Amino acid sequence: MPDPQSPALRRTPLATVHQGLGATMTEFAGWLMPLRYGSETAEHNAVRKAAGLFDLSHMGELMITGDGAAAALDYALVGEASAIKPGRARYTMICAPDGGVIDDLIVYRLADSEYMVVANASNAAVVAAELAERVDGPDGRGADVKDRTADYALIAVQGPQAAAIVGSLTSTDLDQVRYYASYRATIDGSEALLARTGYTGEDGFEIFVGPQAAAPVWEALTEAGGGFGLVPAGLAARDSLRLEAGMPLYGNELGRDVTPYDAGLGRVVKLDKPGDFVGRAALAERAEAAPTRVLVGLAGKTRRVPRHGYSVLWNGEPCGTVTSGAPSPTLGRPIAMAYVTAEIAAEARSATDGDGRLAVDIRGSAEPAELVPLPFYRRPAPN
Amino acid sequence: MSVPEELYYTAEHEWVAISDATARVGITDYAQRALGDVVYVTAPAQGTRVTAGDPCGEVESTKSVSDIYCPADGEVTEVNPEIDEDPGLVNSDPYGAGWLFKIKLDVGDQLPPGLLSAAEYSALTAAEEQQ
């Protein structure tokens, strides 16, 4: 259990709100964050069926501004930031020269020469330093990088009722705010950047506000959401929701020793964009090579749960490693993502007698599993 | 957090209720809160010889898995039949319907050695909270 008094941990502007709600707090990437408020399974189910309210203020907000901002980000990231229209956002990555993933990011283009890069809390400082160095590179002169994490609280409303709840607090027509779009809006009187993004597999919004506005906006959303089944949700539910949605987590599916191609996310690497970018040569080579390992989805056939670091077995022999695993509230059985050798993945997919040959070593016991397509969960199409 | 006076405890967060030379065993309120939602319990089978301090089962929650340590020497006489169907009982009623198994004690009507009183266990969890 973390010591809530520890001065070493960073606190979000909503720390006292969480305390008032009786949250179980946890240390995450140097921050004191709500793990759960009550039952994490109930929070997970509320997001699938109604809506959940998340404090994501630990995420890093990095501002890249200046006439050279677009060109600088084209050089610094694997995506094509210059092709993003103002008011739109993209999922992308920042890679090392050898193609390894430094972080996965959402890049918002706020204006022609103004971008916001949202980085994982654990990587925000590293990404800020890398960006600062790279905007000095050959294509980046005339851009400025600032870590503005402390200037923003980030509140997410996720779930099928998210639009109804947020819509009741803003005059912005949410039908205009499409998936991966952002909009400057007023939420219950507070200025906000409203983005239709998320990490749960549901429709939803991420709301960036100043630190002083965090508690009033949280309270307004809580009140507005009461009749829609909105509940506060912690990092435990966030993790099981993103896993069901097949979304990678840095440190689990992504890391320095993984390229975007390994993670099945080669589409984020824009090899056809003009100009050089960091990692281009290594990634171009990797794009042409046959993969040695692939990220797969596994579903357990028993109730024991595969977890991060457990070995995947084929005919009793190790063939890979689980990166994330959890009991899936939506599917009612354990699920996991794992890297397995490409050879075994192909064999397991085509094997008609594969039953019983694929397993996960769960603390010394080979528990049978099967390959299932990712994502594990896809939200129903809107009516 | 609830720590009933009449029970005994282990440093590994099991509770023990003793009557008629039999110990009823579960995990504490503190433990279930730390674990989060329990999804699966592996308890020692009826008839198993168990030894104090040895792992004899597992409690699996959404986020983690923890060993159950046997609080006393003896033989397992009964496993809570409800837990397999509804492991959430460990969360909702850890000292009642969420009990895990019963042991016929080798020491008979005597108190098995090494158990903590409610006051001692409360002090232990307070110290863990501070870490």
Image: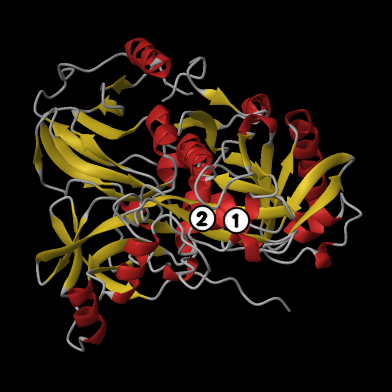
Tally of marks:
2
- The picture places residue A145, in percent across and down from the top left corner, at 60, 38
Residue at the (25%, 76%) spot, across then down: A290
Horizontal relation, residue A244 to residue A20: left or right: left
Establish whether labels 2 and 1 are both on one chain: yes
| Quadrant placement of the C terminus of chain A | bottom right
Circle 1 residue? A71
Q: Find numbered disc 1 in the image and state the secondary structure of the residue it sits on.
A: helix
Horizontal relation, residue A3 to residue A189: left or right: left
- The picture places residue A75, in percent across and down from the top left corner, at 51, 55
Q: Find numbered disc 2 in the image and state the secondary structure of the residue it sits on.
A: helix
Nearest the viewer among A308 and B90 is: A308
Circle 2 residue? A75
Quadrant in the picture for residue B109: top left
* Tags 2 and 1 touching, CB below 8 Å: yes
For residue B104, the mark is none
| Quadrant placement of the N terminus of chain A | top left
Mark 2 surroundings: few (<14), some (14-19) or many (≥20) residues within 10 A: many
Nearest the viewer among B128 and A26 is: A26
Residue at the (36%, 56%) spot, across then down: A253
Do we see residue A32 in this rendering? yes
Identified by mark 2, the residue type is Tyr
- The picture places residue B113, in percent across and down from the top left corner, at 15, 16
Q: Residue furthest bottom?
A: A352
Horizontal relation, residue A331 to residue A228: left or right: left
- Chain that bears disc 2: A
